[in-house]
Amino acid sequence: MPKLIKLLLRNAIGGALAGVCFSGLLVWSNIAGLRHLVLETADGPLAATVMTVFFVITFASVQMARAVMAMTENDGDTPPPRGGVQVSALVPVRVTDRG
């Protein structure tokens, strides 16, 4: 399996677990009456399932995007920049008046 696919799968699984944990914490802490909605109404399991699926999709997508954006290309001559961001040097530019 290619290294990029392994990277994406690993991060997607981590994001999905974070989404499930977040959904569980919201129900456990009874934010906005979610515990009552999930445990004491007829459509509670459906609401919990939809909420959890959307959190899993969101958190997994964010985690995969973060992993991709943190990747850097290294040409071999220079060490990779810290944090994946290359800092360019400022170059002075002379501005002339055309008026």
Image: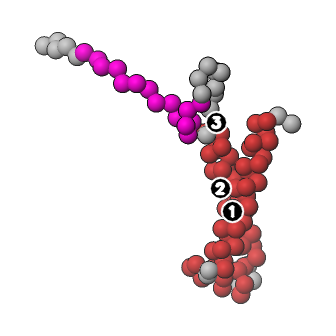
Q: How many residues crowd mark 3 within 10 Å: few (<14), some (14–19), many (20+)?
A: few
Q: Earlier in the sequence, mark 1 or mark 3?
A: 1
5 sits left or right of 84 in the view: right
Does the stretch in magenta take in 87? yes
Q: Is the magenta stretch mostly helix, strand or loop?
A: loop
Instruction: Give the number of the mark in front: 1 or 3.
Output: 3
Q: Which mark is residue 19?
A: 1
Amino acid on which disc 1 is placed: Gly
Does the stretch in magenta take in 96? no
Q: Residue 58 carries which label?
A: 2
CB within 8 Å, label 2 to label 1 = yes
Residue range in magenta is 80-94
The residue beneath circle 3 is: 71
Look at 65% across and 74% down and name the residue there: 25
94 sits left or right of 47 in the view: left
Q: Is mark 3 on a helix, strand or loop?
A: loop
Q: What element carries label 1?
A: helix
